[in-house]
């Protein structure tokens, strides 16, 4: 058992503590898309996780204050795009509040189930939403993979210390 005095600079839980710890955790970068009532919506996510192989399922988190939340909250399908290190600007666009995410600078097409599919990504999937689990000011969305393409090119884009980065050799 470690004495409290041996814990050094331990702080009580807070939003800032959580953000500070996760700045030290490198995460893959994905863009989640959906068909909204007024057109396509999407956001940058670093919370993408594999959930199950049989059936193939994944999860991601989304804030309930996000401009994309209404479409994710009511839609049946989402697109999940793994970004490459050549797509830092695309990741920043989908992370920026008020950005024209599907403007002329974003190459995309309508994919299976009417979901927006981004071009030139290392991999993408179209998924059916099966659950939205409340988690504080977010929801954890669990989705079953229906279609996908893992054959794109590029090394993965990572998010670490508040910046988008590529892998180092």
Image (spheres, helix red, strand yellow):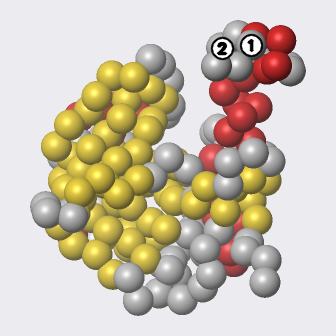
User: Which of the marked residues, 1 or 2, is nearer the chain's N terminus?
Assistant: 1
Residue closest to the far left: 55
Q: Is residue 77 left or right of residue 138?
A: left
**Compared with residue 58, is residue 151 higher up or lower down, i.e. above or below?**
below
Image x and y of residue 140, in percent = 36, 35
Quadrant containing the C terminus is bottom right
Is residue 39 visible in this depiction of the protein? no
**Can you tell which quarter of the image residue 164 is in?**
bottom right
Marks 1 and 2, how far apart in space? 19 Å
Is residue 45 visible in this depiction of the protein? yes
Residue to which mark 2 is pinned: 13
Q: Is residue 162 left or right of residue 111?
A: right
The residue closer to the viewer here, 120 or 62, is: 62
The residue closer to the viewer here, 29 or 109, is: 29
**Compared with residue 160, is residue 138 higher up or lower down, i.e. above or below?**
above
Q: Which mark is residue 112?
A: none
Q: Is residue 144 left or right of residue 12?
A: left
Number of residues whose C-alpha sits closer than 10 Å to that of mark 1, classed few (under 14), some (14–19) or many (20 or more): few
**Mark 1 element type:** loop
Residue drawn at (31%, 40%) of the image:
141
Residue drawn at (76%, 65%) of the image:
165
Nearest to the eye among marks 1 and 2: give it: 1
The residue closer to the viewer here, 151 or 5, is: 5
Q: Which mark is residue 3?
A: 1
Image x and y of residue 154, in percent = 60, 85
Residue drawn at (50%, 80%) of the image:
122
Image x and y of residue 13, in percent = 65, 14
**Mark 2 element type:** loop
Q: Is residue 101 left or right of residue 10?
A: left
């Amino acid at each position: 058992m470690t004495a409290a005095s041996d814990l050094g600079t331990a702080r009580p839980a807070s939003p800032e503590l959580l953000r500070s710890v996760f700045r030290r955790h490198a995460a893959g970068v994905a863009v989640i898309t959906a068909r909204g009532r007024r057109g396509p919506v999407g956001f940058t996510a670093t919370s993408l996780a594999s959930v199950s192989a049989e059936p193939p399922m994944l999860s991601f988190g989304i804030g309930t204050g996000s401009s994309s939340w209404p479409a994710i909250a009511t839609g049946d399908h989402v697109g999940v795009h793994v970004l490459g290190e050549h797509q830092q600007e695309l990741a920043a666009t989908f992370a920026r509040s008020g950005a024209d995410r599907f403007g002329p600078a974003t190459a995309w097409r309508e994919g299976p189930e009417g979901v927006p599919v981004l071009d030139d990504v290392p991999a993408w999937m179209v998924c059916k939403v099966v659950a939205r689990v409340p988690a504080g000011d977010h929801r954890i969305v669990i989705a079953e993979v229906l279609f996908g393409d893992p054959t794109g090119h590029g090394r993965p884009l990572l998010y670490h210390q508040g910046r988008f980065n590529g892998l180092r050799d």
